[in-house]
Amino acid sequence: MNQLQWPSRDEIARLPADGGAEFNRLIHETSPYLLQHARNPVDWRPWGDETFEEAKRRDKPVFLSVGYSTCHWCHVMARESFEDEETARLLNEHFVPVKVDREERPDVDATYMTVTQLLTGSGGWPNSVWLTPEGKPWYAGTYFPPEDRFGLPGFKTLLRRLAQAWRERRDAVQAEANRLQEAVRQAHSFVSAPERIALSRAVVCDALEALRQAHDARHGGFDGAPKFPPHGALALLLYELARRPDHALLAVLTRTLDAMAQGGIRDHLGGGFHRYSTDERWFAPHFEKMLYDNAQLARAYTDAFLLTGEQRYRRAAEETLDWVLREMADPRGGFYSALDAESEGVEGKFYLWTRGELVEVLAQERSERFAAVYGATAAGNYRGEGATPEGGANILFLPKPIEKAAASLDVPADELERQLAEDRRRLLAVRDRRARPHRDDKVLAAWNGLTIGALAHAGACLDEPRYTAAAERAAGFVLGEMMENGRLLRSWREGRAGQDAFLDDYAFLADGLSDLHEATRDDRWLDAAREILRAMEAQFADPTGGFFFSREGHDSRLARSKSGFDAAIPSGNGVAAQALLRLAILAGDADAERRAWATIAVFDGVLRQAPRAAASLVLASAVALDRRDAQALAFAGPVVATAALDKVATERGQTVEASVVLTIDEGWHVNSNEPGQENLKPTRLSMQSVAGVALDHVEYPTGADVRLAYSDEPLSVYEGTVTLRARLRMTADAHVGRRALLLHLDVQPCDDRRCLAPERLELVLPLEIR
């Protein structure tokens, strides 16, 4: 495959529009993916009106090829077909070839991926679609081999057959194109809920139950192979567990996080995570590294550390963000998009190790210990494309946690970790001298929004100012370099920004800016988030509720979609609702809260039918419901206890007041805080210990003195409705983040003849420390 070797910008500026003899028209693009194909003999054109006008003028169908620069099978098809002269001749003679970078044009990608899925039952990249000159699809597939194989037509055979169909069976082609156009429009249409739905916790509970049912208790994660990092599920679990302790759900969370952190999907030398695992145990990765995956996972491990206090989660978060800062940061502040899966034409080659290579770097004794800990064998544990001809290629992973490995090696765990850290450093230095995977160095607004949020959140929660500073640089870069006349642009590369942004870009950036405001308390970031959300509303809002993915005027040809489903990144509508709710919380914006509720409600059918597939909207629902109902409820026979905080967010060193209201049935009472007799259980309010929060004082009301048949002495009791108040103080060293406060209320209900057994009520309240 042609590596990224193209002229300088000055030389490109002097080239003719068609690229001249050495290049095709893609040489004038900025996308690394399009530039990878600029030397192809195929007469590629970029997506746009001029291309379709040319197809109409020549009366030729359009061949659309969609991919991205770090896509392994895109590279394979390029080497086999698009660099082949005969294949290029067929494409140029019979079709108008068009290349699209799916990361720059997610609208085009989504539209025509729907076609491929409708026709084949599956999808993937490269996506290959044949269109009429009007942009209507009539045939599609993904990767095609160059020659006929196993009774199936190769790419050249297929091109000849489709060219013949266009010439000789035009009516049938047009009929199929019309049918597929209507199918795509129906697939992308959205019927709004007929009325605003009264949201309830049932939606959230259903989603959590679906996660319980789908959890792979043996290997972690959900369902079977291949396994992708379950970003939406992790975010929802972390939010809920910070507010409502649940041991079963905690096990789902930690088993998944531990399995990914120990597996081969994690880069144990360089930090960060690969795209997905090809097996069910997180061992054998597809070796791409995507910015959006690592931003979301860094945030998940940060929040897992806050929730559990486990240092292994902090290390995973820090190593991931350190990789982002080391390898993905543009000097001007933004963050690049991805690293390729392959180097020197072989997938995974950059990351694999033989035992001999380990010995060469670490010497015999240390290499044996390192191999034992990281699962490297003489025969090799990897059998994919990256395996060397003589065998012996290894993926580094942790067959068992380092603590257990230390016990089996009879070495103290902290000593083993120090030795392994030095070994990893030495191996990384050697690995960095290998031929490196291609890096897609375009900066995307949406993915940078995710990264800004992850860095700002980790900077505050982990007390790491360098992360916060990097988030500020990136935010300043995007707002300075990727805005044009108040409109956000999708992509930037080498000083050039272009392509109007989509819903994801606006929503993710606004949410990330809100994180940055919370981390720095600098109002300029909140003001910027507000302006981004206003622009989002103006361009993408559907009057019936929710947001379209593309603005009016985006040339995606067939449909303007509105979706609540998550993919590798959360849905734009889910994050838009979350960002609006955060604006309501941070700035007291009641209109933003109403718009968030309207967005959630319009996807009521999606939430009820497929909550796992819309985790970002479920999370938005949980936030909205908690904001509306920030109270706890518990029962003890004739006694009902409700609890609430006077504010749901506070800062270090500040105090929060908790009020607990007891409603006691007529004819019943509970003993007061000082009932007057030692054998009676007093009403007491306490709090389960939680780092960073102290219970300073509880104010109990004065009880009423009553005489009961079974007591000669008057007793002090509470009757009717009474309120207890507690002052909670945030310590100066409290971790920033969300947590659940567990209040314990001890009561003993009695009537005038008997007392019931004492009971302890549990009241869980959510609190955020900023």
Image: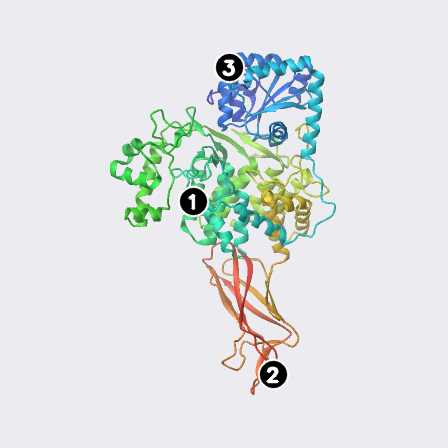
Q: Residues within 10 Å of mark 1 (few under 14, many from 20)?
A: many
Residue type at the position of mark 1: Ala
Q: Which mark is residue 212?
A: none
Chain-order first, disc 3 or disc 1: 3
For this rendering, which residue is in front, 474 or 728?
728
Chain-order first, disc 3 or disc 2: 3
The extreme front residue here reads 151
Q: Are marks 3 and 1 in contact (CB under 8 Å)?
A: no
Image location (x, y in percent) of residue 196:
72, 49
Q: Which mark is residue 316?
A: 1
Residue 521 appears in the rendering: no
**What's the image's color scheme?**
rainbow
Q: Which residue is mark 3?
A: 84
Name the residue at 34% across, 48% down. 404
Vertical order, 143 against 362 (above or below): above
Q: Secondary structure at mark 3?
A: loop
Q: Which residue is mark 2?
A: 706
Q: Residues within 10 Å of mark 2 (few under 14, many from 20)?
A: few
Image location (x, y in percent) of residue 641:
60, 67
